[in-house]
């Protein structure tokens, strides 16, 4: 029985040494593991920001396309209004009717605007 007790004592001492070595290993790995976790979290945040930047960039491109389309539409409308004004002035001249001051001013304003553009 005493030999069993001796073997059990040696086994427990070896188990204690292994436990202490494992605790030391885990303790010394803790900073590395913590840094690795933080690094992964930062990589995830960077990836999220990259996606967000791409979305914003795509949105700006779409917005610029809308502005370009709006600019074309405005140009067509301005030309159409100018043509209507010209027609109205020409009509008044051919019918020998007086041209209203507002019509003449609108024509001049539109002409000045187009000249600046």
Image (tube, rainbow, N blue to C red):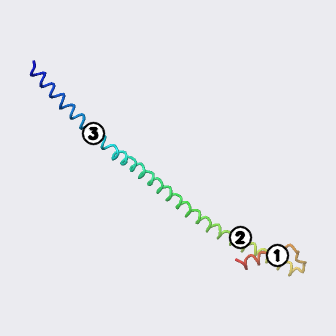
Which residue shows up at 50% across the image and 55% down it?
A: 52
Q: In the picture provided, is 6 more to the left or to the right than 46?
A: left
Specify which label sits upstream in the sequence, 3 or 1. Answer: 3
Which residue shows up at 71% across the image and 70% down it?
A: 77
Q: In the picture provided, is 41 more to the left or to the right than 20?
A: right
Q: Is residue 81 above or below residue 17?
A: below
Q: Quadrant of residue 69?
A: bottom right
Q: Position of residue 58 (x, y in %)?
A: 52, 61
Which residue shows up at 88% across the image and 77% down it?
A: 99
Q: Position of residue 48 (x, y in %)?
A: 46, 53
Q: Position of residue 23 (x, y in %)?
A: 28, 37
- Residue hosting label 2: 77
Are the residues flagged by discs 3 and 1 in contact, CB closer than 8 Å?
no
Question: Front-most of 77 and 105?
Answer: 105
Q: How packed is label 2: few (under 14 Cα within 10 Å), some, or many (20 or more)? A: few
Which residue shows up at 90% across the image and 81% down it?
A: 96
Question: Front-most of 67 and 100?
Answer: 67
Q: Is residue 43 above or below residue 81?
A: above
Q: Is residue 34 above or below residue 46?
A: above
């Amino acid at each position: 029985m005493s030999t069993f007790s001796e073997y059990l004592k040696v086994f427990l001492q070896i188990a204690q040494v292994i436990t202490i070595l494992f605790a030391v290993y885990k303790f010394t790995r803790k900073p590395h593991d913590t840094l690795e976790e933080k690094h992964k979290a930062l990589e995830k945040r960077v990836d999220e920001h990259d996606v967000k930047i791409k979305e914003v960039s795509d949105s700006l491109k779409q917005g610029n396309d809308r502005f370009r389309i709006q600019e074309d539409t405005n140009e067509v409308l301005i030309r159409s209004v100018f043509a209507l004004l010209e027609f109205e002035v020409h009509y008044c001249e051919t019918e020998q009717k007086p041209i209203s001051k507002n019509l003449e001013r609108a024509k001049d304003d539109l002409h000045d605007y187009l000249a600046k553009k």
